[in-house]
Amino acid sequence: MRSVDLAIYADALAGEAAAVTARVERVRARLRESAIEREARRELPRETIERLERFGLLRPGDEARLTAELHRLEADLAAVEALQAWVESRLTA
């Protein structure tokens, strides 16, 4: 393999890793928001909750789906990082 090809591929993988990392962080943020919203639902009056839902500020909590998505994305990121490490090891060989 030509080192220039490996370097270009390593750059592409770095971009992909950054994109997946951003998605991981968005899901983590959504899980944190979901926990806050769950607590707010317990403490605020029902009328307030309904108004916030209609307004779109409180969303249905689907923490199980978000957690599953987080685990999948973390596994995807680990796979990309493993390939990235392999490509980089070829660059230094």
Image (cartoon, rainbow, N blue to C red):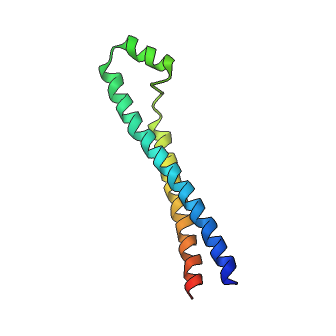
Q: Quadrant of the C terminus?
A: bottom right
Task: Point out residue 82 in the picture as x, y percentages from the top left corner.
Answer: 53, 70
Total numbered circles: 0
Above or below, 2 relative to 50: below
Please give the name of the residue rendered at 55% of the width and 55% of the height, measured from the top-left corner: 20
Above or below, 8 relative to 63: below
Query: In the figure, is residue 16 to the left or right of 25?
Result: right
Q: 71 or 33, which lies in front?
A: 33
Q: Residue reaching furthest top? A: 47
Please give the name of the residue rendered at 54% of the width and 58% of the height, measured from the top-left corner: 18
Q: 51 or 3, which lies in front?
A: 3
Above or below, 67 relative to 16: above
Please give the name of the residue rendered at 48% of the width and 28% of the height, measured from the top-left corner: 60
Q: Residue reaching furthest left? A: 43
Q: Quadrant of the N terminus?
A: bottom right
Please give the name of the residue rendered at 56% of the width and 71% of the height, measured from the top-left corner: 84
Residue 44 sits in which quadrant?
A: top left
Query: In the figure, is residue 5 to the left or right of 71?
Result: right
Task: Point out residue 24 in the picture as x, y percentages from the top left corner.
Answer: 49, 51
Residue 14 sits in which quadrant?
A: bottom right
Task: Point out residue 68 in the picture as x, y percentages from the top left corner.
Answer: 49, 46
Q: Residue reaching furthest bottom? A: 93
Query: In the figure, is residue 57 to the left or right of 20?
Result: left
Task: Point out residue 6 in the picture as x, y percentages from the top left corner.
Answer: 65, 77
